[in-house]
Every structure is written in C-alpha cells, then in structure tokens.
Image: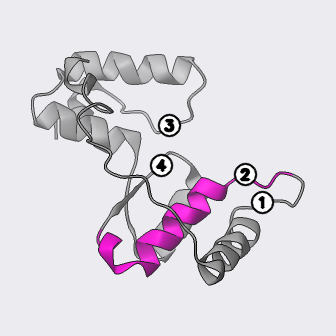
Amino acid sequence: MPALNGLLTDGWLGTAIEIDSEPDAREIERIRRAVFGGTENRPLRHLGEAQTCYVITNWSVFAGSWWVSDDRESLRYARAQQITTRETIDLVGIAVVDGDIEAGEAFTLMRQMADQGRRLRLPGSVADLAC
C-alpha cells in the first residue's frame, strides 16, 4: 500500500517509549503474569501487551490512546481498564471509509490475512467494511 511507504522513514510511529522506572517495571511484570499468563522461563511473552496497557492507563501523555489488537484476552483486559480498543476489522473499516482502500480489496486482504494464520474477526461481507 503506497500510503504505508513512509511509515518508518517519516516518523509516523514517533519516538520509541522506554520504561526505565523500577516501580513501573514491577507492575508491568505483575500484569504480564497475572493477566496475560506470562511465565518466568519466557520473559518476553506478553510483555508488549502488558507494557502497552500499563502505559495507556498510567502515563498521562498516553491518556486516550487506542489499544489495537486481535487477541481476545488483550481486548477483554483493555476494555475492563476502560481503554478504547480497536481490532483489525475496525482499522480496515476506517481505511475504507476514508478512501484509502476499496471495500472489495479490503475484504480480500482480510481473507488473505486469515488464510495466512492471522486470528482476526472477519467481516461477513464487503458491505460490512463500508459502514
């Protein structure tokens, strides 16, 4: 998609976030284990989810940020924390409405994603993406 060409080079993602506070790190580890099932022998498993949810709910600079995921447990937890959540189907629908991609092409793309093993909620029809 041409609109994505500058994703990294144009700074669209912004500056990397660094969590360097020990109290923050301890709470993130607690969330990683208690909420997402992280284990000691796999310290990176679910770390990103725990970090992101923690930062959105505890750092004022990220208040109002969206949690974007197709993982059911991540979405459940984020919603329980009153974090605005979006799934791939939502983002693709926004792209269709904004004219960034045609609904039929978006529908095909999402089906291809599922065929490649991505677990995501799929639209029932092309029309479901145009609302």
Q: What element does badge 3 sit on?
A: loop
Percent across and percent down for residue 30 are 72, 75
Q: How far apart are marks 3 and 4 (CA)?
A: 9 Å
Query: Mark 1 or mark 2: which comes first in sequence?
Result: 1
The amino acid type found where label 4 is placed reads Ser
Mark 3 or 1 closer to N-term? 1
Residue drawn at 28 percent across, 22 percent down: 106
> What's the distance in space between the residues labelled 3 and 1, CA to CA?
22 Å
Instruction: Mark 1: give few (<14), some (14-19) or many (20+) Cα within 10 Å.
Output: some
Quadrant position of residue 12: top left
Image quadrant in which you'd find residue 60? bottom left
State which mark lies toward you, 3 or 4: 4
Query: CA gap, disc 2 to disc 4?
Result: 17 Å
Q: SS of the residue at dot 4?
A: loop
**In what element is the residue under mark 2?**
loop
In the foreground, 1 or 7 = 7
In the depicted structure, whether residue 67 falls above or below residue 119: below
Question: Looking at the picture, which amino acid does disc 3 mark?
Answer: Leu
Start-end of magenta stretch: 42-64
Residue 69, label in figure: 4
Mark 3 Cα shell of 10 Å, populated few (<14), some (14-19), many (≥20): some
Residue 22 is at least partly visible in this image: yes
Q: Who comes first in sequence, dot 3 or dot 2?
A: 2
